[in-house]
Amino acid sequence: MPKLTVDSGDVTVDLLEDETILEGLYRNGFAYRVGCRRGGCAICKVDLLQGEVVYNRPVAENVLTESEMAEGTCLTCRAVAVTDVRIALREDNLRRVSSLMALYAATRTG
């Protein structure tokens, strides 16, 4: 089970098998920037500082380019951790959400 650490260091969560980074955050009661949740808007981009992710669903080239991926950019709504990962958020901070909201969001992601 891969671990996700947010660069600030105060948030670490376990990710389930085939769970996206965004799903794992919401399941653990954290909210981050969310748009379409389908890899089409790019609002959930983060910097992958450590570890490896894969995309088990298509990501549009105009949303996340090969060069961005090579530089460590990833989409949290589509990125599934293969190893433990560490990310840096862009333009926003994690927020705590109620457990009911987290449960709802986790069922709606994907």
Image (cartoon, helix red, strand yellow):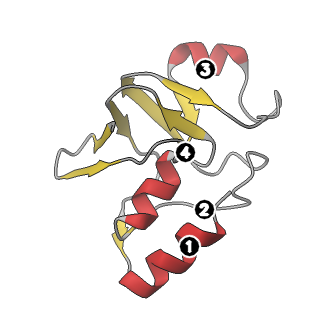
Kind of residue sitting beneath label 1: Ala
Q: Secondary structure at mark 1?
A: helix
Kind of residue sitting beneath label 3: Met
Of mark 4 and mark 2, the one earlier in the sequence is 2
Q: Position of residue 48 (x, y in %)?
A: 43, 29
Of mark 1 and mark 2, the one earlier in the sequence is 2
Q: Nearer the viewer, residue 45 or 97?
A: 97
Gap between marks 2 and 3, in whole Å?
Answer: 19 Å
Q: Position of residue 64 (x, y in %)?
A: 71, 30
Q: Position of residue 83 (x, y in %)?
A: 37, 25
Q: Which residue is mark 3?
A: 69
Q: Secondary structure at mark 4?
A: loop
Q: Secondary structure at mark 3?
A: helix
Q: Which residue is mark 2?
A: 34
Residue at (44%, 22%) from the top-left corner? 52
Residue 81 vertical placement versus 44 (above, below): above
Q: Which residue is mark 1?
A: 105
Gap between marks 4 and 2, in whole Å?
Answer: 9 Å
Residue 91 vertical placement versus 83 (above, below): below
Tag count: 4
Residue 21 shown left or right of residue 69 in the figure: left
Q: Nearer the viewer, residue 61 or 78?
A: 78
- Please say whether residue 31 is visible from this viewpoint: no
Mark 1 Cα shell of 10 Å, populated few (<14), some (14-19), many (≥20): some
Determine whether label 1 and label 2 are within 8 Å by CB: yes
Residue at (47%, 61%) from the top-left corner? 32
Q: Nearer the viewer, mark 4 or mark 1?
A: 1
Of mark 3 and mark 1, the one earlier in the sequence is 3
Mark 4 Cα shell of 10 Å, populated few (<14), some (14-19), many (≥20): many
Q: Which residue is mark 4?
A: 76
